[in-house]
Amino acid sequence: TGYAFVGDLLHGGDLDAWLPGSDPAAWLLSVRTLLERYPEIRRVFGAHEPASMKREDLEALEALLSSIVDGSATGSPVWWLGWRVSRYPGPGFAVLAP
């Protein structure tokens, strides 16, 4: 059907990669694996509403995570729940990361 249900890989609102124990490189690997192994996927649904993305959004997430991991992304510093993190905007989503 072109749908994938990916649990906590995605969730509603800003996507968190800043919590203690978070691993943006592992998250990147999971997104890449999903894209490479399942080319038929057209829409992905995460664990919490409103968490769904088109394949193009998932590809944009992969590119953004890649640039965060390699240090080339530019984010805006923000305070989030008492933590200083950076917000990296994507098309229709943002990633919060250290």
Image (spheres, rainbow, N blue to C red):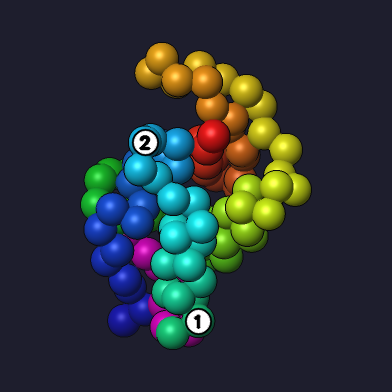
Which is more foreground, mark 1 or mark 2? 2
SS assignment at label 1: helix
Viewer-nearest residue: 12 or 73: 73
Percent x, y for residue 72? 75, 48
Magenta stretch: give its range.
38-45
Please check the rendered image and state whether residue 40 is part of the magenta-colored stretch, yes or no.
yes
Viewer-nearest residue: 6 or 67: 67
Which residue position holds label 1?
36
Q: Is residue 57 visible?
A: no
The tag earlier along the polypeptide, 1 or 2, is 2
Residue at image coords 36%, 36%: 20
SS assignment at label 2: loop
Q: Is residue 35 visible?
A: yes
Percent x, y for residue 51? 35, 49
Residue 15 in which image quadrant: top left
Percent x, y for residue 23? 44, 50
Q: Amino acid at mark 1?
A: Glu
Residue 20 is marked as: 2
Q: Is residue 82 left or right of residue 59?
A: left
Viewer-nearest residue: 20 or 42: 20
SS assignment for the magenta stretch, majority: loop
